[in-house]
Amino acid sequence: MTDACVRVALPLPLATDYTYGVPEPLRDAVAVGMRAVVPVRERELIGIVTAVGVERPAMRLRDVLALPDTEPLLDACHLELARWLSSYYGTPLGLALRAALPAGMWGASQVRLVLADEARADGAVAQSIVAWLAERGGAGLVSSLKRHLGREVWAAVHRLAERGAISLTVEPPDTRAARVTQKLAVLGEHVPSLLEREALFRRSPRQREVLELLEALGGSVPLTVLREQHRVSDAVLRGLRQRGLVHVEEGERDRDPFAGRAGTPPPETPTPAQQAAIDAIGQLRAGQGALLYGVTGSGKTFVYLEAVRRVLAEGRGAIVLVPEIALTPQTVRRFRGVFGDDIAVLHSGLSDGERADAWRRIRRGERRVVVGARSAIFAPVPALGLLVLDEEHESSYKNGEAPRYHAREVAFVRARLEGAAVVLGSATPALETMERVGHDLALLRLEARIGARPMPPVELVDLRAHPLVQGMRPVPWSDALDAAVETVLDRGEQALLLLNRRGFAAFLQCSKCAAVCGCPSCSISLTVHRAPAGLRCHYCGHQEPVPAACPQCGGSVQAERGIGTQQLEQAVAARYPRARIARMDLDTTGERWAHERILETVERGEMDLLIGTQMIAKGLDFPNVTLVGVVDADTGLHLPDFRASERTFQLLAQVAGRAGRGPKGGRVIVQTRSPKHHALACAAGHDTDAFLATEREQRRVPAYPPFVAIANVLLSGPEEVAVADAGTRVADWCARLVAAKRLTLAVLGPAPCPLARLKERWRWHVVVKGPSREVGAFVRYASRRLPKLSGDVRVVVDRDPVSLL
Ligand code: ADP
Ligand code: ZN
């Protein structure tokens, strides 16, 4: 028998696929692209069949146990895409496939046996199986059966199935929608002012803390979350309820904010510039791409909508990627407004089962437009015609685990494989993207904002020279920003205040010995938080109470240094008592739809000032926002990373684009200590071209992308010396490999990473730079052949890293 074997890729870090035999009853059914349940050591796992009719090797083989699908889940293009991922990023095929299929399609499936009406069994094992099933009303899971019989049952199961005594079905993964109701604590109508709070809570500071926590969390929080995560006692809640400040109601958990919601209707007619872009996109040939380079507010979304509409009219489908669904509810609503129920929104609130269901609906062609974040790039849209990446420069398009793919790169490959077109959109394109213009990207520009609204003027305020409001200290608050906020409040308009550091203070420092409280697991200082109070690590989540005295010298005075959004909120609330204030950062949005709720209050005009981290810079369109204040533009400027300037410029341009989107116009005030830096100077002039040109020159020497490609070989382990040694070994190995293969790559390091320790692991890296093709060859070779490292040292090879921190 030569043709009875299959190759199966497993979602494990294995270098190759495994070969399995196929039992007679499954032989006709098996096909490439199907899932197969196979034995791996003591477990049963789901893998993907990558080849059939494979010659039987000369060793003893185990058999495929079951085939859950009646037809392949993955078509040839998808499989080809996974092969490309595997080869480009140096990742085993099984891991690439795991990224390309929803999680619910992997581990959770179970094989169920159903007894036929007239089942006869010969042999002891078969008889016990039939008896066991009969006892259970005729059906049961193989996993329970194995536990019951305490032995291998598959051979007997297959024999029974062959004779029609039982049938095998594969339980789909958990598809129960997560629509359970639960009790929520909800803020009352009356929002006490700061003065009222002082009076109300003099004797009950904990009640005030909890009230402010509820405000920070978006106004409605499950009781279980308050009790378990924030240790709120029932007595405190009772107090707040008795005062009418909080009430408890039943609410739906994980309500999908997009389901059943009316969409936003589109504008009637495109502007001439939009029309030109729509036409150019319509003319793209299969596999080609366009960069839609247009300032914020220039109407890029409408161009995407029209481009998708054309593709649908041709009977094809489209995928639209946004950096983060929760932060771009307005974009989702616009798509819903045009495509209604033809659209599938793949958002992070879906359970594994719901995601798998959505995936099947897309594959059956019941939803032809998919909107989602990074992983939606793999959505199985039949007859794919168009791939759109909005805000293509965003680093969230890069996957943080193997395969470390970038959705933009995947989009180009997928477009080539399936004959689709790619549209990238941005007001601040990545340098790598600009480098492609003229090769595989056509450049389409939208120079002006819709309605000829001017870009808001951006004023740089030099914090070293400008008079500051003393009462706001230590928050740097210039007279200029102060006056602008007062004007906004006088006029009943709205302002966004950006500070890209959450928490209360950046760190706690002893005034006597200058020791800084650091995370025990990471080489980073702990951030001071107020609601709830404590020190927290923003990398690993470690929490501890604020120490009463310096852990080093016992000194009693500890100063909070560097401000965070919590402190900004407090200072702003004290300075502008009449303002209604909301805050949006990772701490306030822990609950799934908190973003949505906070943004809705701003949209309905219930908030005057929205304070937040970079989260508030994303694609929001609030016409009543007439002021954007950047409290400290330098928070990311001096990070030891080659993208620090680019990220700072992008953030400033994005957040500045939130101002003046309505007829009232707007202005932007940026506080900085580096007004001459090109990221700031160019942002002030709205001059993205100048920024790109200057930044590009700075990437020549030392060479960084787009002039070279990079692979980052990252080593980590619990022991510092072992990691450093491994660094030296790996760097030597890389250098020898480069010499042996006559590559022109530069090998830099080993060196400790700027983030030298993370989650109890020391980190070193070796950076390999050079032409992309050579980096690719290096990555493929290194991911298979890197020397075995001792001392629990892990190695990760990251091609095209988004940062080197
Ligand atoms: P961008 O995505 O480039 O930042 P948007 O697509 O959000 O810009 O458009 C900015 C605003 O202009 C939105 O409120 C949008 O509804 C409006 N708009 C876009 N195109 C048109 C048009 N052709 N006519 C009228 N209004 C438009
Ligand atoms: Zn930590």
Image (cartoon, rainbow, N blue to C red):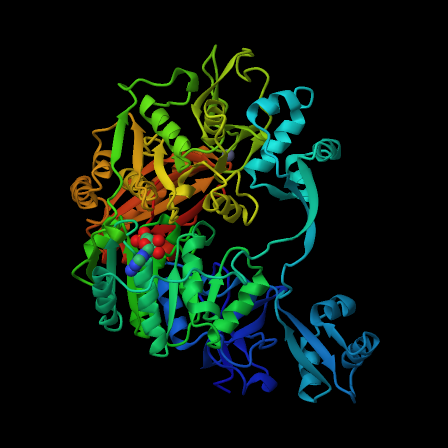
Is 315 or 34 nearer to us in this picture? 315
Residue 106 showing in the rendered view? no
Q: What residue is shown at x 56% (from left), y 39% (from top)?
A: 217
Q: Is residue 397 visible?
A: yes
**Residue 309 percent coordinates (x, y):** 35, 71
The x and y percentages for residue 48 are 50, 71
Q: Is 118 displayed left or right of 771 in the figure? A: right
Name the quadrant containing residue 41.
Answer: bottom right
Vertical placement of residue 615 versus 446, above or below: above
Q: Residue at x 30, y 35 (%)?
A: 668
Instruction: Identify which residue is drawn at 31% across, 32% down.
Output: 669
The image position of residue 265, as x and y in percent, is 41, 62
Q: Position of residue 492 (x, y in %)?
A: 42, 36
**How many marks can you see?**
0
Q: Which residue in the rendered view is the most extreme toward the front?
A: 491
* Residue 510 vertical placement versus 167 (above, below): above
Q: Nearer the viewer, residue 320 or 24?
A: 320
* 374 on left or right of 464: right
Specify the quadrant of the image occupied by residue 647: top left
Q: Is residue 25 left or right of residue 739?
A: right
Specify the quadrant that holds the C terminus.
Answer: top left
Left or right of 182? Residue 96 is left
Looking at the rendering, the quadrant in which ligand 1 lies is: bottom left
Along the line of sight, the residue nearer the viewer: 143 or 629: 629
